[in-house]
Image (tube, rainbow, N blue to C red):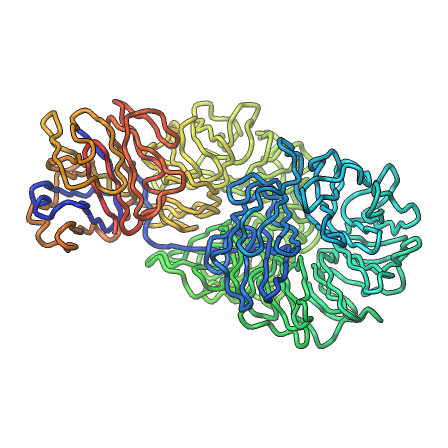
Amino acid sequence: MVTRRLVMENSLHFTSVNVMREKLRHLLLLVLTTLFLLASPLASAGYAAVADAPKLTLVKPGSIDAIAELPDGGLIIGGAFTQIQGKEQSCIAKLNPDGTLDEDWDPQIRYRTTCVKALLRDGDYLYVGGGFAFVGGKMRLGICRLDLATGKLDPDWYPVAEGDHSYKGIYAMQPLPGGNEIFLGGFFSSLGKNIQSIVKVSTLTGDVDPDWDPGLASGSQVYAMALSGGNLYIGGYFTEIAGVSRNYIAKVSAAGTGALDMNWNPDADSTVSSLVLSATGDKLYAGGDFRQLGGVSRRGLARMNAAGTGQPDAWDPAPEGIPGFIASVRTLALTGNSLYVGGQFAVIGGQNRNSIARLSTVDATADSTWNPDSNKRVRVLLLSADGSRIHVGGEFFTTGGEHTLSFASLETASDNLVAGFTDLNIGEAGIVNALVRHANDLYFGGDFVRVNGQPQFFLGKIDTATGQLQHWGAGFDGSILALAVSADGSALYTGGDFTHIGLDVKNHLARLQASDASVVPAWNPSASGSVWTLLLNGNDLYVGGRFFNIGGVQHYLARLAADTGVLDSGWNPQASRGVYALALSGNDLYAGGVFSTMGGLPRNRLAKLDTTTAAVDAGWQADTNSTVRTLLVDGNALYVGGHFTQIGGVDRNRIARLNASNGAIDNQWNPDASKDVFSLALSSNGNDLYLGGWFSSIGGIRMPKIAKVTTSDATLDMDWDLDMSTGGTVSALVLGDTGLYAAGEFPRIGGKHTTLAHIVDGHLLTVTARASGQARYGVIDSTPEGIKCSPYTGITDCEHAMVEDDYVLTAASGDPQLTISQEWLSGCDSAGGTSATCGVTLDADKAVAVRLACEQFDMLPPEEPVTTNTTVRCREIKAVRGYEIGDGGRVRFEAQSSVELGPGFRVNSLADYFAISVQ
C-alpha cells in the first residue's frame, strides 16, 4: 500500500491529468474529512500552515553604484539590487532610452561580497567590476567583460588566474588612451599577479602587466582614479605606497613601473572616494570622508593643484553633515563651471542641500535654483553626453518629494525629474524587524519603502480580522527596529535608525497616535543612536539600544515617562555597551545585549535589574559568551536566545532556559539551535515555545528558521514545519487570537510568498491506494508529462504505466464527516473530456499547507524551488539532498512540495500515478 500525507490549503481541487473522463469515474473514490482544531490558537499539536492573508511583498531600497550611458541614450546601471520594474534581476540592468527595462538583457550576475561597483563602456564591450562571483553561470571573481548589445559574457577575457581567489572586489576602472589597456582598482591581494589593489590590464588578452606595480601596502583599497597625460591619480583607503607614506590620495606614473610622484602629497586624513580633473587638467577635485587635506580644514570636498605638491587651493564649499553624521562626498561630475556633488550632507556651498548639489567652480557656492533634494546617500553621478541630464544613483527612495527608488534622472536646466525614469522600483526584498499587536491591530516595522507595490515607509498595520493591509502610516526616513503599544491601544512607540518623520526631527525614537499614525510633536527624547528594544509597563517606557545619550546623558539603557518622553535621570543602570532585549517580571527587569558590565558590576551580555532603583542583582549572574538577542519570561522561567554557545558556564547553543529568580541554568531543557535565535513567543497554554531566527536545525534535526518545542522537555514538534529551506531569517514573533504571526527576511514561508505570515493549525489528510496487497496497473495512451519511468516491481509496461485503483482521503483522526462518491466527477468542469477539475472547500478559518510522503520511493528534488506546473517525481529510495528517510522506508517530501503552490501544481508518483492540482 502506498500512502501520501498531505496538509492542504483552504480550497482543495483534485485533477487527474491525461486520463479519459469515463475512466476517471471508475478510478477514484474520495472521502474527505477535516481535523477538529482546539479553539485556542496553536495550543495543541498540529500541522503548521500559513493563511492566505496577510500576504505582503516588501521592497527596500537597493543601491545604484555605477552608471554607463549607451549611444542611443539608454543606460546600464549597476549596484546592489535584486529586482527592477517588478522583475527579479540582480546587480545590473539595461534601460531603454524611455526608461523601460530591456528584459532580454540580463548577464545574470550574482552576489559574492558585494555586487556591481564599476562600469566602463568601451566600443562594443562593457567592463563590469564589483564583488560578484558568477556571471551567466560562469565563475568571474569581481571583473568581467560583456557584449554590450546582448549582455552575454565574453568567455575569453578574464584577468583572474585559475585558482586565484584572493580578492574582495573591483571598485574603480580607468581606461588608457588607445583603448588597449585599463586600470583596475579595488581591494585584492592578487589579480593574475601578486599586485596589491591596483593593476594595469590588457583589453586584448586580459593579461595583467607584471611590471606596473605602484606598490600599495597590504590591505589597501582603491576607490577612485583619474588620468591626465602620463599621470594617474588614485584615491581610496591606504597609507603607504612603495614604502613611502601616502595617506588616502597619491599620484603615480601611468607608464613603466607605476612610480610614485615623490613631491605630490595632499595628505588627507581619511578616505578619498571620488576624483575628477578639470578640463584643463591643472586642478583635481576630491571627495570623501576626510576632515582636512594638506593640513588645511576641508570637510569631505576639496580642490587642489594637479601639479607641484598638490596643496588645496582656497576653493571650499564647506559641506556639513546631517545631525549625528559627518559630511561625506561619494561622487563628482564636472561640466564647464558646474560641479555636481553627491554623497551624504545637509549643507554645502552655503545652501541647505540634501545629498546632491550643483556648485560653482568659481566661488564654491551652491546653485540656488537647482535643488533635487535626495533623502538618502547619493553614490554615483553621470552627465549625459549632451549635458541635458544628470543620472543619479544611490540609496535614496525620494527625490524632490517623488518616490524614486535608488535611481533618478534629472534635467540639468531645471532639476525636474525626467519622464519615464521617475520610479524604476529598484530594490531588494524588504525586512520586518518588529511586531506588536493590540486587539485587531497588528503593527509591523522594519526596513522597507514599498508594500504590495505601494509606498509605505518602514511602518505598517494589518487588520487581523481580515488579514488586510491598512491605509495607514507615517513618513519615517529610516528603519524601525522596535515597537511598543499602550495598554489602551491609543499610543504606538517606535524605535530604530530614523532621524525624521516627515518634517519632524525625531532621532531614533517617537510616539505616534495609533489611530492615524500622526506624530506627537512634544514627545521627543532624541536618542543619539539606534534604539533596538522597547518595553512598556504602565507609564514606564524602557529603552535599550546603542545610544550614548537620550533626553540627557545616559548610555544604552534608559527609562522614560511614556506620556511625556522625559528621561528618569534617577534610574541609570549604566550599561557598558548596547542593549538588544528586555523582559519584565514584577519588579525585575532582565536585559540582554553586548555589554560586559552593568551598574559597575561584571555582567557579560545578561543582567537582572531592580525596576525601582536600577540596581543590578548582585547574586544573579548568568554570563554568556556572545550576544543575547531576545528574552522571554514566563513565571519563574527566563528564556534566552541569541548568538551564544555558553551561558552560566554551561554549553547551550543559542537558546537556554534559566531560573528567573537565581539565574541557574535548567539542565534538563536544551533545544540546541544550530545558529542564532532572534525571537521567541509562548503558546497560549504555555506548553509550547516558538523560536525564530537564522538556525537550520534544532537538536540536530533539520528545522530551518522557525520551530516549535515543548516547554516541558524541549522536544521538537516535527510536524510543525513551515518549510523555510529557501533561506532567510525570522526576526519577530507575536501570538494572535487565531494563530502565530511571524515576520523577518525570507522569500517564502509555508509555501507562500509573504514576509509576514499568519501561522495556524492545518488539516492533515492521508491518501491511500487500496490495492489488496498488489497495486493494479493499467495502460493509458501516453505517459503523463514529466514522469520519468524505469522498471519497478509490478510495472511491466514502463512507458505507459498508471495505477488503476480506488483512492481514499481521510483525516489523521476522527470519523469521516463528508463523503464524495463517484458521482462527484460528473459535476466537474472538464477540458475536451480528457481531464477533470473538482473542488471541495474546507472551513474558511482553517488555513492549510501541503506535505507529501511516499513509501518505498524517493523524491528527486529540482535544481530550483518548485513553481507552478512543476512535476515532482518518485524514484527508488536513496539519500537525496533535501529529503529525510523516515520509519519503514518512508521518504517525506519536505521542502520542495510546499515552497510555492499555485495553479496547476502537480504531484506525480511513478509507481502509481496520481496527480493533484491546487488551484
In the rendered image, residue 666, in percent from the top left (x then y), is placed at 47, 26
Question: Exactly how many numbered labels are in the figure?
Answer: 0
**Quadrant of the rendering where the N terminus is positioned:** top left
Please state which of residues 20 and 746 is positioned toward the viewer in this rendering: 20
Q: Residue 674 vs residue 604: left or right?
A: left
Q: Residue 300 vs residue 751: left or right?
A: right
Q: Residue 46 vs residue 321: left or right?
A: left
State which quadrant residue 75 falls in.
bottom right
In the rendered image, residue 187, in percent from the top left (x then y), is placed at 70, 41
In the rendered image, residue 408, in percent from the top left (x then y), is placed at 60, 65
Residue 185 visible in rendering: yes
Rendered position, 668 above or below 127: above
State which quadrant residue 279 falls in.
bottom right
Q: Which residue: 89% across, 54% down?
A: 310
Q: Which residue: 27% across, 36% down?
A: 852
In the rendered image, residue 608, in percent from the top left (x then y), is placed at 57, 36
State which quadrant residue 377 falls in.
bottom right
Q: Residue 556 vs residue 694: left or right?
A: right
Rendered position, 721 above or below 891: below
Please state which of residues 406 and 599 is positioned toward the viewer in this rendering: 406
Residue 566 visible in rendering: no
Please state which of residues 554 and 412 is positioned toward the viewer in this rendering: 412
